[in-house]
Image: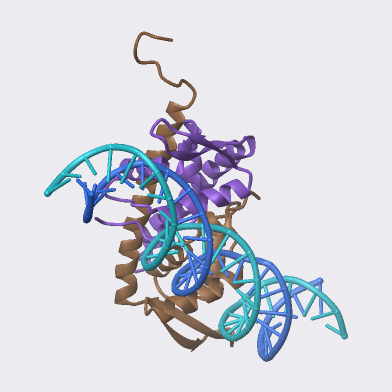
Chain colours: A purple, B brown, C cyan, D blue
Amino acid sequence: MVRLRKQTLDGNVETLLLAILEAGPSYGYAIAKELNQRCQGILQLGEGTIYPVLHRLEEKKLISAKWRLAGNGRERKYYRLTARGRKALVTNRQQWQMLGVVMRRVLKSTKNLSPKPQLKGATI
Amino acid sequence: MVRLRKQTLDGNVETLLLAILEAGPSYGYAIAKELNQRCQGILQLGEGTIYPVLHRLEEKKLISAKWRLAGNGRERKYYRLTARGRKALVTNRQQWQMLGVVMRRVLKSTKNLSPKPQLKGATI
DNA sequence: TACAATACTATACAGTGCAAGGTATAATTG
DNA sequence: CAATTATACCTTGCACTGTATAGTATTGTA
């Protein structure tokens, strides 16, 4: 599997988790499954990644947690988006879009400049 | 100016610098100017960001440096892409594309699920 | 004379992903 | 019954990266 490197993903895991919770409350284990299934072959996030991020999001009050007993007799910690979390998600989407603009502006334009240095003007 | 946050940009500055050097050798101060001009209103990288990154890239042998005296009597440290740097840039572009796939896959699909919970079936 | 622009450097901090290791219960398989 | 797998959570500590801060030195301009 061609994996996404840490550095590339950096700063976006929070956004991904918020986005998944946007669809409705869920818990860590399920979120991991969901995410990894959706990004099969590209991304594989372990629990060591997801749980700490969830805790951070809770600290920042972007999500809130509630323990609940599931049908299978297991305790699950359900998370849901808070109002602040919803706002943050909007911001994060914008940020993501802006990053796209920057990356495209730089990655593309240099590509075109490099093979044929400068054609303008009569000289050459 | 609506700025790109560190976390959003994280892991991509190296790619940006490599991309700019793809067009030909340059030096820190000029790279900064170039980058900031191209991303006016979105991105503003200080020297405290760019120089350390250049040093790291040099350590990793993705770029190589050579001091040269410029016409204005100033010493400039010119950087150029190495073979490894070129390869890294290719990889980074791929990584960037993959991140796009992941983000779109997650950010979009949840958006559609959230407003209207479940319409399939006859109940509701 | 003072200030801006050019040009580079070093140090130290904070945020983030994630590997590694741990606990505990239910369900399945040998 | 024993062993394994799946479920479900947690913590500690490392490495990487962006960047704020501060410092040096030269040239040109007001």
Taking depth in this image into account, of A56 and B11 the one nearest to the observer is A56
Q: Going by the image, does D3 lie left or right of B121?
A: left
Q: For residue A2, what is the image quadrant?
A: bottom left
Q: Going by the image, does B26 lie left or right of B6?
A: left
Q: For residue D23, what is the image quadrant?
A: bottom right
**Position in image of residue A120 (x %, y %):** 40, 60
Q: For residue B65, what is the image quadrant?
A: bottom left
Taking depth in this image into account, of B36 and A87 the one nearest to the observer is A87
Q: Is residue B75 above or below residue B5?
A: below
Q: Going by the image, does A38 lie left or right of A101?
A: left
Q: Is residue A30 above or below residue A103?
A: above
**Position in image of residue A37 (x %, y %):** 31, 42
**Position in image of residue C29 (x %, y %):** 16, 44
**Position in image of residue B15 (x %, y %):** 42, 64
- At 49% from the left edge and 36% from the top edge, which residue is drawn? A21
**Which corner quadrant holds the N terminus of chain A?**
bottom left
